Image (cartoon, rainbow, N blue to C red):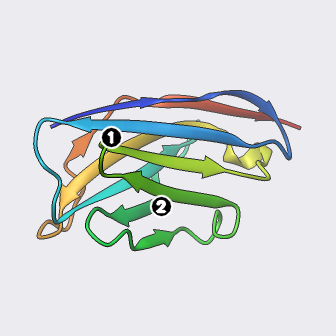
Amino acid sequence: VQLQASGGGLVQAGDSLRLSCTASGRTFTNWVMGWFRQAPGKEREFVAQITWNLGTANYADSVRGRFNISRDKGKNTVDLRMNILKPEDTAVYYCATRSSASRNFNYWGQGTQVTVSS
């Protein structure tokens, strides 16, 4: 399984940004795709996840209502649309995936930096 994340950058508070993750290496039926982030000096934290089959999404409290996760089965991509960005959203963002039978995300892409200036 390979995951390739893209779309990070430097934006101002209140702006929007879209991250994209391209997945390859297998079919992802019954798998779960997720986004995590790690800010400097902090542990990696969950941001959002979506089930490949039904598109059921879950969000961290800190981003619910501002971020939207979606997947495109035809393109094998998972996007994270981030709105009303705040300086505290600054982090390296990672996409990850796991089978629905696994408790842990065990495949990770490289990170993409998101920096939000105040």
Q: Quadrant of the C terminus?
A: top right
Q: Position of residue 40 (x, y in %)?
A: 59, 36
Q: Describe the element under mark 2 as helix, strand or loop.
A: strand
* Label at residue 48: 2
Q: Describe the element under mark 1 as helix, strand or loop.
A: loop
Q: Is residue 62 left or right of residue 4?
A: right
In the rendered view, tell whether residue 41 sits above or below residue 105.
Answer: above
Residue at 47% from the left image edge and 61% from the top image edge: 48
Between 44 and 77, the one lying in front of the other is 77
Residue found at the very far front of the displayed protein = 74
Residue at 69% from the left image edge and 69% from the top image edge: 65
Whether residue 67 is visible here, answered yes or no, is yes
Q: Quadrant of residue 60?
A: bottom right
Q: Quadrant of the N terminus?
A: top left
Q: For the residues marked 1 and 2, what is the alpha-carbon distance in whole angstroms?
A: 20 Å
Q: Is residue 17 left or right of residue 50?
A: right
Residue at 19% from the left image edge and 49% from the top image edge: 106
Between 82 and 91, the one lying in front of the other is 82
- The crowding category of the residue bearing disc 1, from other C-alpha atoms within 10 Å (few below 14, some 14 to 19, many at least 20), is few
Q: Position of residue 32 (x, y in %)?
A: 27, 61
Which amino acid is tagged 2? Ala
Whether residue 44 is visible here, answered yes or no, is no
Which is in the foreground here, disc 1 or disc 2?
A: 1
Residue found at the very far right of the displayed protein = 118
Earlier-in-chain disc, 1 versus 2: 2
Which amino acid is tagged 1? Lys
* Label at residue 75: 1
Q: Quadrant of residue 16?
A: top right
Q: Quadrant of residue 3?
A: top left
Residue at 28% from the left image edge and 62% from the top image edge: 52
In the rendered view, tell whether residue 116 sits above or below residue 54.
Answer: above
Number of numbered callouts drawn: 2
